[in-house]
Amino acid sequence: MIAPENPVLAVLCGADHPPDMAAIEDAAVVRYTDERGLADALAGADALFVYDFLSGAVPGAWHAADRLKWLHIASAGVDPVLFPGLRESDVVLTNSRGVFDDAIAEYVLGVVLSFAKDFARSLDLQRAGTWKHRETERIAGREVLVVGTGPIGRAIARMLRAAGMRVSGAGRRARVGDPDFGVVHESAALTRYLPEFDYVVAVAPLTDQTKGMFDAAAFAAMKPSARFVNVGRGELVVTSDLIAALQAGELAGAALDVFETEPLPAESPLWTMPDVLLSPHMSGDFIGWRRTLVEVFAGNFRRWLAGEPLWNVVDKRLGYVPSESQGGAGWATGN
Amino acid sequence: MIAPENPVLAVLCGADHPPDMAAIEDAAVVRYTDERGLADALAGADALFVYDFLSGAVPGAWHAADRLKWLHIASAGVDPVLFPGLRESDVVLTNSRGVFDDAIAEYVLGVVLSFAKDFARSLDLQRAGTWKHRETERIAGREVLVVGTGPIGRAIARMLRAAGMRVSGAGRRARVGDPDFGVVHESAALTRYLPEFDYVVAVAPLTDQTKGMFDAAAFAAMKPSARFVNVGRGELVVTSDLIAALQAGELAGAALDVFETEPLPAESPLWTMPDVLLSPHMSGDFIGWRRTLVEVFAGNFRRWLAGEPLWNVVDKRLGYVPSESQGGAGWATGN
């Protein structure tokens, strides 16, 4: 794929434009747009940078994409743009694989330790001015299942193992001898091995196969002492089933960074449930992440101008960058 | 040191007696006592097991210790019993070195991640029903100084390094090439190198040299973005200086598990200060710790009966078990 002379780039963003775009503006006509202006911006555009990566506006404006060749999204998950119109087109889809991995791994280790060390209770007691000693859990030797064996899942596995936990994976295909997970179970048979785990971490890409995979049957299969962590997508979970399972004591807690509806609606019981830790879709958003996201796009933009193969090309049938393909670490090495 | 026939063992405990004492009761006359009965229990006792390890009652009852040979304390810190009367006597002092190391290391990593990921704010926002995205810090590459190079400090260093942090130590003697710390700075020159660190962890034993080492000068030397963690002893810190430094913004936060006065008095400003995380002297108290503490004592008790050298003999001049001496891991191997 070779960029045309004087390419036109549409950038879907909100009020905050992406930083550090000067080099790109020197090499392309850049049309910044919000969701309402997207169709106008797409008409005649050669490429689209979806900087507002949670926007659902692309499908509705797709009819106007009359010469689009490339769509890059500033996130790891591509579900907001992977609709039939894109899937069936020749448009190349790339993502920001690699940016969030280690930050999310730190976040997951943090919530695991928060559960084990009862930190939320400590803070509630502190706020109430109450001194109350408790005994707390160790994390060493505890069994963790990471559902999702992409780069984020792998970073989580390495981090939790370094901290003394025992980690397995769940992915599309069962296998052994994985360098990060050792054993990888088959996601389709989740309920069979869920009873073994103290922590279950959801970080799978959102696809037709994974949507709603954490349902009543899955939660019923967990240990009553297990904690569930979701740093993937809210739609991996049937939220009403999770709420019912927590209320029934089928698992002991949940740390949720992503939700079926974001922001989480005010009426959701999750806000006030004990043993539930909420954060507003920020587990990977380290200080400086927006500049890094633009660096990743800019690296691919330079490759596009030069006619080189793009990084992080998503397999539109699978819904993610296959692990066998050229990885996404190039941006980090300054290439 | 050989135990006499039919030894008499005094056990200082509160209302909760230590568990799993049957084997010891078979081999000794065991006198369980609270603080008020301690002097009576010490008269004629050959050994004292200080199970209530925060009690300050031993000095006041010491006059009655007419044949005591051995004092074992169910803690790592020996400051509550290391008073001149014991120091100048021939009584052998042993501690519970090794029991708490890894649990405290997990706790420290947890509070470091809580600061970096802004978990306390997330919980406050959750309790208020507010969805508010923030960018948060990475821990990878951040510089940590662990003040105290005993087994707990070493476990902390290994754990934080495994999670991607850069760790140095501070101890009695400066040195390089330490297996856990690499560089060890000299504690006496603390203010000189404190400006380099993002996190400062206090875990030194409480001695005449370390008492109040974290004072106004120390806090003034820290980065304004630094966080201070105390899992050692409250008396390592001049609490009023810490409060003033936090109020002045000389450091960015503190996680405190130990205090000059415990329980922390209701009127302490620490309860309600932003960026302060409190817990009630529990960082090492994993579920099962009390049984483990009795196992450690029971192991030494068997060695005492057999006339073998005791584990974890405290150098009463230094105030801790020298790292060169026979270590405290024997209990963990079932010996």
Image: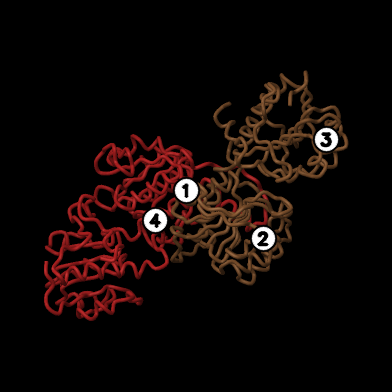
Chain colours: A brown, B red
Rounded to the nearest angstrom, the CA distance separating label 2 from label 1 is: 31 Å
Q: Secondary structure at mark 2?
A: loop
On what subunit does the disc labeled 4 rest?
Answer: B
Q: Which of the marked residues, 2 or 3, is nearer the chain's N terminus?
A: 3
- Both marks 1 and 3 on one chain: no
Question: Which mark is first along the chain, 4 or 1?
Answer: 4
Q: CA distance from mark 4 to mark 3?
A: 53 Å
Tell me the kind of residue under disc 1.
Val
Q: In this rendering, would A207 be left or right of B6?
A: right
What residue is shown at x 29% (from left), y 66% (from top)? B334
The residue to which callout 2 is attached is A214
Give the percent coordinates (x, y) of residue A197. 54, 62
Q: Secondary structure at mark 4?
A: helix
Amino acid of disc 4: Ile
Marker disc for residue B112: 1
On the image, the x and y values in percent for residue B159 come to 41, 49
Mark 4, residue position:
B104
Rounded to the nearest angstrom, the CA distance separating label 4 from label 2 is: 34 Å
Nearest to viewer (mark 4 / mark 3): 3
Q: Chain of mark 2?
A: A
Closer mark to the observer between disc 2 and disc 1: 2
The residue that mark 3 highlights is: A38
Neighbourhood count class around disc 1 (C-alpha, 10 Å): few under 14, some 14–19, many 20 upward: many
Q: Nearer the viewer, mark 4 or mark 2?
A: 2
Q: Position of residue B165 (x, y in %)?
A: 44, 42
Horizontally, is A240 left or right of B197 in the view?
A: right
Question: Is the N terminus of chain A in the top left, top right, bottom left or bottom right quadrant?
Answer: top right
Marks 1,4: beta carbons within 8 A: no
